[in-house]
Amino acid sequence: MRVMVIVKASKDSEAGILPDEKLLTEMGKFNEELSKAGVMLAGEGLHASSKGARVRFSGGKKTVLDGPFAETKELVAGFWLWQVRSMDEAIEWLKRAPFEDTEVEIRPVFEADDFGAALTPELREQEERIRAEAAARH
């Protein structure tokens, strides 16, 4: 199964304070372990929400909201995409991450079979084609 590991923002990350060399070194070692184990598919840190925007969809209207956004505990500061056998395995990996004083969320990623009959063979073929095209470009 694939899981998204979502690192929540903090006052420091929202202030644009970057990790120090010690944390970057520890995170590099952790990422190397994830990669060697075949767990890490992707992972990136995100700039502060002051550099971002949101688009709100409501009643047919689309409203653009520029950052920063108020509730830091609800913001995302980074993510990984992992391939694991189970949620328990994801939790065990996450416990090894070199974090302090933060909260990290793990969420399963939808797979095509999760959508049942609503994902028709035509829609499934379209999805697979789009993913293959995107992978070929990068």
Image (cartoon, rainbow, N blue to C red):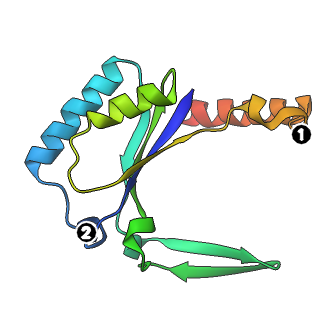
The structure residue drawn at horizontal position 55% and vertical position 31%, both measured from the top left corner, is: 2
Residue 73 at x, y percent in the picture = 39, 67
Badge 2 crowding class, 10 Å Cα cut-off, few under 14, some 14 to 19, many 20 or more, is some
From mark 1 to mark 2, how far is it between C-alphas? 42 Å
Residue 103 seen in the current view: yes
Q: Which of marks 1 and 2 is in front?
A: 1
Q: Which mark is on residue 118?
A: 1
* Circle 2 residue: 16
Residue 76 is marked as none
Q: Does residue 40 appear anywhere in the picture?
A: no
From the viewer's perspective, is 116 left or right of 62? right
Q: Is residue 53 left or right of residue 49?
A: right
Query: Which element is circle 2 on?
Result: loop
What residue appears at the point 13 percent right and 39 percent down from the top-left corner?
Answer: 25
What is the residue that sits farthest to the left in this orientation? 22
Q: Residue at x 30, y 36 (%)?
A: 95
Give percent across and percent down for residue 8: 38, 58
Kindly indicate the quadrant of the structure image that contains residue 18. bottom left
Residue 28: image x %, image y %?
Answer: 21, 35
Please count the marks in the image: 2
Which mark sits nearer the N-terminus, 1 or 2?
2
Q: Image height check: is 88 above or below 45?
A: above
Q: Where is residue 92 in the image (x, y as percent from the top left)?
A: 35, 29
